[in-house]
Image: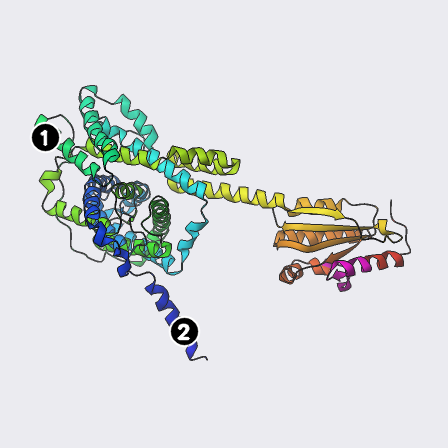
């Protein structure tokens, strides 16, 4: 038996690892969806290009780092990830975390930071931590989605107004959108708004006639042609960096590993949460297959490692590009693969052509995409379901827009936990129940209480206080047969209650203590507080019989 145990453990590990690797069924629909996947990939690739450049530059690592992440990280995450429509790459949330690290240690640490964070995320996938995303309540997910939709829309306002200089503007999307109106040159803004409107009109009006046509791509082409032939004064993507660097393992030292350990953990946490939430949102708004959360973590970890080897940023699921992918009709992960290929082709051969695409046109694509993420009927339903659901939904959406998406998820989960504890606490109760007939002399000196629900930290003090306030009795029976949860706080308070009542001369009997609660009762002193082990009755009949016997034996008056 001892010889077989190690081999069994290895087989279990290999079987688990196999479930995190790509399978042919990932592309089951490709025979019928290859056209729409191809067009979706091209559309997302063009939309992702300026985002990759901007995120790379704003992080302090340079535009090239953003492109590497979108191409290398996006490709690896797509192949190994657990979502069929998720598009990965650099994101704004990641930039917020990376910028101070790069400012402190320099751009040279970016590769090592990505590798360290990627290893952590891979380990999370191997240990099946992906299931934790299933613990995030539905109102929190929808609040996150609504908030992200608002942020995406607001992020495009400066580009739609032709505001190029963002120096001194807030990093908050809502605030910067308001600030951009004060910096708008309306002589040129009318043209950028026209360009954005052309794209939006193509997407909104065209979709009413045929949802299978890539109207976003058609809108981009139309807007670019108008700008080129009319020579409109609007900003375009501009010159692109050429080529990708060769992979190389970054400089490594014990001191650097120590310095980057905390930032790597933060980056890994952000990458895991953002990727899982993005993929969860995608799965809930499309019918392209279920989300394999553990595989998604494993794939995103590998993506960050691969990106780091090329000098790129840590990769994460990008909700904006994922939303564009879904709205373009993508069915399989081939679309995201095409997106990475398109970016690579653009970098090496089509830079001059794509350089002419107006930024306002890309803003139009993302604005419509953001609007499609906001479902007013769903918002109305959430607000009318219950006060608890409405609170979680509103709080998550507000914090997402005003603070940060990670804090929003944390706030939503904290509120959900508080509301759950409150609900469970209210469901718990203590009732004084009469003794069975026929009544016997001195039954008025016996009080029987039935505890129901959960005797835990949020409810124990309230429940036990009622028992402690009981007067004019000699024996108290506490029935615990219907207690589902007994934690250390509840058990400790119960022990203190028993000790206090025994000190007043009141005998306490514990009735129906379940086997699963015995160990907790022993370790927290409940059984020790009971004056005699004989005072632990297995059921109602024996508890009442023992209580009547104690009262009959007592040769003292009940204290007033």
* In the image, residue 171 above or below residue 128: above
Residue 256 visible in the picture: no
Which range is magenta?
529-546
Which residue is under mark 2? 8
Residue 164, image x and y in percent? 21, 29
Residue 403, image x and y in percent? 39, 35
- Residue 520 got which mark? none
Horizontal side of 496 relative to 345 (left or right) equals right
* In the image, residue 401 above or below residue 349: above
Considering the whole magenta stretch, tell me its main secondary structure: helix
Q: In which quarter of the image is the C terminus?
A: top right
- Residue 228 got which mark? 1
Q: Does the magenta stretch include residue 263?
A: no
In-front residue for pair 169/294: 294
Which residue lies at the image location 18% right of the left edge and 56% below the top edge?
247
Q: What element carries label 1?
A: helix
* In the image, residue 531 above or below residue 418: below
Question: Callout 2: few (<14), some (14-19), or many (20+) C-alpha neighbours within 10 Å?
Answer: few
Residue 155, image x and y in percent? 29, 33
Q: Is mark 2 on a helix, strand or loop?
A: helix
Task: Give yes or no for contact between labels 2 and 1 (Cβ–Cβ under 8 Å).
Answer: no
Which residue lies at the image location 69% right of the left edge and 50% below the top edge?
451
Residue 508, image x and y in percent? 77, 55
């Amino acid at each position: 038996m001892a010889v077989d145990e190690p081999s069994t453990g290895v087989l279990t590990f290999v079987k688990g690892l196999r479930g995190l690797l790509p399978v042919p069924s990932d592309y089951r629909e490709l025979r019928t969806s290859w056209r729409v996947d191809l067009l979706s990939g091209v559309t997302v690739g063009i939309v992702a290009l300026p985002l990759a450049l901007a995120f790379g530059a704003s992080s302090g690592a340079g535009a090239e780092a953003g492109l590497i992440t979108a191409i290398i990280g996006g490709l690896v995450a797509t192949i190994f990830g657990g979502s069929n429509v998720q598009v990965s790459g650099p994101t704004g949330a990641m930039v917020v975390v990376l910028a101070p690290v790069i400012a402190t240690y320099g751009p040279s640490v970016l590769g090592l930071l990505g590798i360290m964070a990627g290893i952590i995320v891979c380990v999370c996938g191997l240990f099946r931590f992906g299931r934790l995303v299933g613990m995030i309540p539905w109102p929190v997910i929808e609040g996150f989605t609504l908030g992200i939709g608002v942020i995406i829309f607001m992020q495009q306002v400066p580009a739609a107004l032709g505001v190029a200089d963002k120096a001194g503007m807030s990093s908050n999307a809502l605030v910067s959108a308001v600030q951009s109106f004060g910096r708008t040159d309306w002589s040129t803004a009318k043209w950028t708004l026209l360009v954005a409107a052309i794209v939006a009109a193509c997407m909104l009006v065209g979709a009413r006639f045929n949802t299978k046509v890539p109207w976003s791509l058609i809108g981009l082409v139309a807007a670019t042609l108008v700008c080129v032939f009319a020579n409109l004064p609007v900003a375009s993507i501009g010159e692109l960096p050429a080529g990708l660097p060769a992979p190389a393992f970054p400089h490594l030292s014990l001191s650097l590993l120590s310095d980057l350990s905390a930032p790597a953990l933060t980056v890994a946490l952000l990458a895991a949460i953002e990727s899982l939430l993005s993929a969860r949102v995608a799965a809930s708004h499309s019918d392209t297959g279920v989300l394999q959360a553990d595989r998604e973590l494993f794939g995103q970890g590998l993506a960050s490692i691969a990106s780091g080897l090329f000098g790129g940023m840590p990769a994460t699921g990008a909700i904006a590009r994922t939303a564009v992918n879904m709205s373009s009709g993508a069915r399989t992960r081939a679309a995201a693969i095409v997106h990475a290929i398109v970016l690579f082709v653009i970098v090496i051969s089509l830079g001059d052509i794509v350089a002419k695409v107006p930024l306002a046109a890309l803003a139009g694509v993302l604005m419509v995409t953001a609007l499609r993420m906001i479902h007013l009927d769903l918002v109305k339903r959430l607000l009318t379901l219950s006060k608890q659901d409405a609170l979680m939904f509103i709080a998550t959406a507000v914090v997402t827009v005003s603070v940060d998406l990670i804090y929003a998820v944390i706030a939503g989960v904290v509120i959900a936990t508080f509301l759950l504890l409150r609900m469970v606490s209210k469901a718990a109760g203590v009732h004084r129940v009469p003794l069975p007939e026929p009544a016997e002399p001195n039954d008025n000196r016996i009080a029987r209480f039935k505890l129901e629900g959960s005797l835990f930290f949020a409810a124990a003090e309230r429940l036990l206080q009622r028992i402690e306030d009981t007067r004019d009795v000699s024996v108290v029976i506490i029935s615990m047969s219907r207690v589902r949860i007994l934690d250390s706080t509840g058990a400790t308070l119960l022990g203190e209650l028993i000790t206090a009542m025994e000190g007043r001369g009141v005998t306490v009997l514990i009735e129906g203590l379940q086997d699963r609660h015995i160990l907790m009762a022993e370790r927290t002193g409940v059984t020790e507080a009971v004056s005699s082990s004989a005072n632990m009755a297995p059921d109602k009949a024996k508890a009442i019989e023992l209580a009547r016997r104690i009262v009959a034996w007592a040769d003292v008056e009940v204290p007033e």
